[in-house]
Image (tube, grey):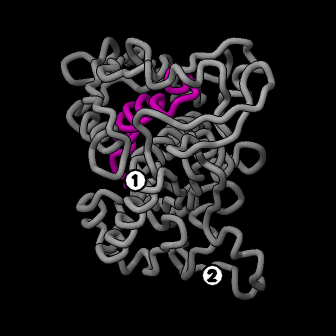
Amino acid sequence: MAGNSFGNLFKLVTFGESHGQAIGGVIDGCPAGLPIDTEKVQQELARRRPGQSSIVTQRKEPDTVKFLSGIFEGKTTGTPIGFIIENANQKSNDYSHIKDVYRPSHADYTYDQKYGNRDYRGGGRSSARETACRVAAGAIAKQLLKDVTFTAYTSAVGDIKLQKKFEELDLSEIEKNPVRCPDPATAKEMETFIKQIRSQGDTVGGVVECVISNVPVGLGEPVFDKLHAALGGAMLSINAVKGFEYGSGFAGASMKGSEHNDHFRTDGSTITNFSGGIQGGISNGMDITFRVAFKPVATLMQKQKTINAEGQEVEMQGKGRHDPCVVPRAIPIVEAMAALVLADFYLLNKTSKI
């Protein structure tokens, strides 16, 4: 199986399955001498872990990370950083009913057709459980980019949308509610809706918005390695993501150039930020802003018609522990993937200057 690594200079390789003994990763290319706060890594994992509230999957995983190499006396050594996260709460029998059945809109069918063999327990390698490795690595990348801040939050769940602009938000509210929406009233409405959806055995999607501040000017390349292209690829690699837009996004398509152009101040900053902090594929020093759309979770607690491995039409119903909405737990994943991209481009930018 190819495609288990991410990045160029700051590179992450992950391994493991949802119901295997452990998941883990190796970070290659992290510079030597970087102080690592392992508690901050654990805090990021706690934001993603299952079982953290009543509106997410009730699988109980502590997601305790154990570093195996690359860190000595609290600092990176410059050698590969190896880590594992043990799986502590597998219930593989919850998936025995789909051993030979394909869940609609899931990876089951394509995985089986491509490899001729699949780990049906929780989706195996295609499970979002793998994203814990990304969060651990992203927490290291954040510490490399110590002056850069990553702020992701829930801006929509179904048709319920956050109406306030970023400048109007109290970002301290993000971690005060299980939905991770920075507006308490909207957060409560979202939470109630997700609980209603769960009671119906259904699922719902949503949107994560992310703002990256204090980004150095000059990250990204103007042709194939555009910064926004790398961010888009990173976000689209996350399970359940169906869309990515940065800056004005699709709304920019209905604007005039006279409305959309970001006019400069004398210090090089811009009055508006429709460019989303990136121009010509290169960061311009303004906040990088983007949005990520997540589809409804494919596994439903409702009966659905599907097919089995023999091509026969059958009826199936999801069992076990699943998120009715992935968006609240996706917040740290979005931040982590953004941090991995910027760490890579930060190191690439250093090597491009003589």
- 345 left or right of 84 in image: right
Instruction: Provide the major secondary structure of the magenta segment.
Output: helix
Q: Nearer the viewer, residue 114 or 245?
A: 114
Disc 1 residue type (three-letter): Pro
Tell me which residue sits at (48%, 17%) in the image. Answer: 16
In the rendered image, the vertical position of residue 318 relative to residue 170, given as above or below: above
Q: CA distance from mark 1 to mark 2?
A: 35 Å
Within the image, what quadrant is residue 19 found in?
A: top left
Furthest residue to the right?
311
Q: Percent x, y for residue 323? A: 43, 45
Q: Percent x, y for residue 235? A: 58, 46
Front position among marks 1 and 2:
1
Q: Percent x, y for residue 175? A: 27, 58
In the rendered image, the vertical position of residue 37 relative to residue 241, given as above or below: above
Residue 150 can be seen in this image: yes
First to last magenta residue range: 121-149
Q: For the residue labelled by badge 1, is the local secondary structure a helix, a strand or a loop?
A: helix
Tell me which residue sits at (50%, 42%) in the image. Answer: 337
In the rendered image, the vertical position of residue 172 relative to residue 67, given as above or below: below
**Residue to which mark 1 is pinned:** 328
Tags 1 and 2 in contact by the CB under 8 Å rule? Answer: no
Tell me which residue sits at (74%, 20%) in the image. Answer: 309
Structural crowding at the residue carrying mark 2, measured as other residues with C-alpha within 10 Å and reported as few (<14), some (14–19) or many (≥20): few
- 77 left or right of 285 in image: left
Within the image, what quadrant is residue 61 found in?
A: top left
Q: Percent x, y for residue 27? A: 45, 22
Residue 141 sits inside the magenta stretch: yes
**Residue to which mark 2 is pinned:** 263
Tell me which residue sits at (72%, 25%) in the image. Answer: 308
Disc 2 residue type (three-letter): His
Residue 24 can be seen in this image: no
